[in-house]
Image (cartoon, rainbow, N blue to C red):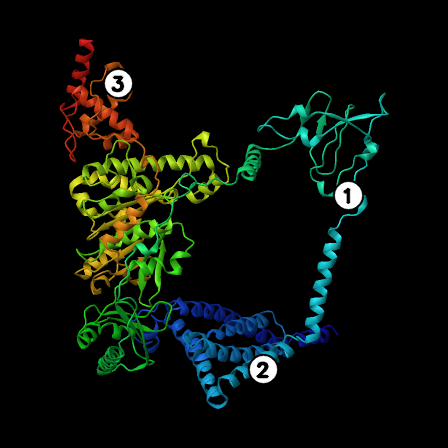
Amino acid sequence: MAKARKKETTNDALPEEKLPWKMKLQYRVLIGSFLLLFSIGLLLAFVSFFIYGHQDQSVVDELGNRSEKAYNWLGKIGAYLADLFIHRGFGAASFLFVKLFFVTGAYLVLDLPLKKLKNTWFWDLFVMIVLSILFGYFATSLPQLGGTIGYEMNLFFQDFIGKIGTLLVLIAGLVIYLLFKIKMSPESIKTFFESKKKEIKDDIDSMRPTPSDGAYNLEEYAVNDKEEESHIDYDIDEVLKPTSQFEINKEALKPTISSYSEIELEPTLKTEPKPVVTSTPLTVTPVETPIIKTNDEAFVIEKAQDEDTIEENLAAKIVADFGEFDPTLELSNYKFPTIDLLKEYASVGITINQEELEENKNRIVETLKNYGITISQIKATVGPSVTLYEIVPEAGIRISKIKSLEDDIALSLAALGIRIIAPIPGKGTIGIEVPNKNPTMVPMKTVIAAAKFQEAEMELPIALGKTISNETFVVDLAKMPHLLMAGATGQGKSVGLNAVLTSLLYKKHPAEVKFVLVDPKKVELTLFNKIERHYLAKLPDSEDAIITDNSKVINTLNSLCIEMDNRYSLLKDAMVRNIKEYNEKFKQRKLNPENGHRFLPYIVLVVDEFADLIMTAGKEVETPIARLAQLARAIGIHLIIATQRPSVNVITGMIKANFPARIAFRVTSKIDSRTILDTGGADQLIGRGDLLFSNGNDLVRVQCAFVDTPEVEKIVDFIGSQKAYATAYMLPEYVGEEGSNVNLEFDISERDSLFRDAAEIIVTAQQGSASLLQRKLKLGYNRAGRLIDQLEAAGIVGPFEGSKARSVNIPDLVALEHFFNNEQNND
């Protein structure tokens, strides 16, 4: 019997049913895991397709070519799958495949019945088709949204039932999905809104206070004493009315006879009820209010309140009484320049030459056709000086092949400055920029009068000119935050600087912006001398606000560094991060001028011909320029530097890295273009104000607005004839090593405590410079300069020799020790 029972048990354990089920479960988990991973990979491939899809077109056609590099996050397979599902498939609606594969994989892994997925697959495929046709209907300029299927089905429907009929079919598909899938009906919509209305009504009713909650009967708090018949109350509004920040108006303590039954606190004053003071000590303690103790002689208010809250409350009261601080009040009658001061040219506006456009189009198509490149569509956008031809090549054409034909297209058009943009950022087209035979000038008047500039909500708006699409190009200098202008001689740099300054003069009040102008040419910016007391900033001991002597530039730059440090100290005390927040806080009277706070105007440093400054003033310019470029953006000091070619010996890498905004006029070689913009294109410009603007990665071609010298003269005469400040904006005082007013006869007892250490450093390095002492002793420039002056008075270093380091008169430390011993013996 035992054997029989054992045999029965082994028969039940035979894997006739359970083993196949285990294998089936293993397969389900395996396939489900594969679908989950595949859906995640498909999502990454789809997302990267919209970023690198244009660059991976050649990879899709040549999967076997290992030399082709794929930018897709899943490599060539990802590029192929994304192209298959999105470009050749349903477009952006293909993201629903990611959901379907993920849900199916989850059902398999979790061992859920797959019958429930039939409904999901059916409706998702239905929505996928409807969305694909919908995107193909509306987004014709972005074929990736609708895909090939959406595009072809859209054309199929439009051929038979037209655009309106296709739209009706799409609406019908949307209604079917809402009714049968989402179960949305007019009755359900009505019920939803009625329920929401009822909830809002209940919330409002619950917020209304009941009569019992609103009033406090103070009879139960009253303390009976010998004077029950009459009680002395005080007018609390008058008592608590402050005569200064921390004083209480004690003269308002006038007793009035009243009874306790007449005193009642209104419901609206729950948070801060009025305390009632009687001849008998009385304490009112409502819920969630500070404890207020009072007696006959004085008031003691115990309330947790920090200084910031008091300051803000006081500031709010001052603002309520006097209004916000207005920095323009000192020149309240100042009038901005009128637009009619600018010259109006006869040849304004773009003239479209139909024959020229047709001829250029035919030559472009013919040239590309000679190399086996066919075009499905071409569009021309006429600009002031350049016409942009946007072409859409047939499927399978490599973009690099068109890019390589730049010189051939230029030869066929017989034009200077052909530039090919392949592809145009944000569009699925290739751009060919062809200069017009008769370019149109862009007057400054049309740019200033444009609504885009007049309505610009920017801190420092600059109207540079007009783009290829004839739109006014306006940028914010405060967000750049510094601007580097470069280009060959005579291509429009100085006119561009005048356009920048003119834009700011038309938009900003003299109290809001100041200019520091450096003009080595001595003729470009001298016109602005007439607005010195309105807009310019200078050193206290300087005669002219516009710096034309390169030897004075060092003092000005170091003075700007001192101004920068001072401003950062003010921002630190005000606990703000940038000049905009600081000025906003100052206008709201939350900063006390007695503590050194003041309204901070923006300061724009403009340097024309920076290369000449480096050649004459030497390397001492680099340190303050680098400091300003790195740190000055937050406190409102912005740099505009113009040079012919920003090479490494002119603008170092540290300075150049802090100039993301670049303006490149025409240059002679591609190397110069890469030096300025870090990419080619500036060598293909046509000159006369034609420029490329870069503020990161994108390049924008702009025809710079032309402002002539007589126009600038009229503007500065108009401003200069008005009431001005007493002086120009004074920068902090700075005395450099070359200061002629420095008294070199120092008393030994008045020497700096670090005099001996400084002497040892100078003698060891055999180099007499203040910057060396700054680095070694970690000093500021002022103290280092005083040490150098004391060393010169002692005879350890020689006199100032321009950009060269001072000579050291003591050869070594032993001789220096003898020198100090002789000084002590002589004393």
Q: What residue type is labelled 2?
A: Ala
Identify residue for label 2.
172
In front of the other: 254 or 223: 254
The CA span between labels 2 and 3 is 93 Å
Tally of marks: 3
The CA span between labels 1 and 2 is 57 Å
Residue 197 at x, y percent in the picture? 71, 63
Which of disc 2 and disc 1 is earlier in sequence? Answer: 2
Residue 67 at x, y percent in the picture? 28, 71
The CA span between labels 3 and 1 is 75 Å
Identify residue for label 3.
751
Secondary structure of the residue carrying numbered label 2: helix
Q: In this view, does 667 lie to the left or right of 421?
A: left
Which of disc 3 and disc 2 is earlier in sequence? Answer: 2
Asked if residue 375 is positioned above or below residue 703 in the image, the reply reads below
Asked if residue 724 is positioned above or below residue 33 in the image, the reply reads above
In front of the other: 345 or 493: 345
Q: Is residue 516 visible?
A: no
Asked if residue 338 is positioned above or below residue 246 in the image, the reply reads below
Q: Is residue 785 visible?
A: yes
Residue 589 at x, y percent in the picture? 50, 37
In front of the other: 91 or 298: 298
Identify residue for label 1.
214
Q: Which amino acid does label 3 sit on?
A: Arg
Q: What residue type is labelled 1?
A: Gly
Which of the two discs, 1 and 2, sits closer to the camera? 1
- State the quadrant of the N terminus: bottom right
Residue lying at 47% horizontally and 83% vertically, measured from the top left? 154
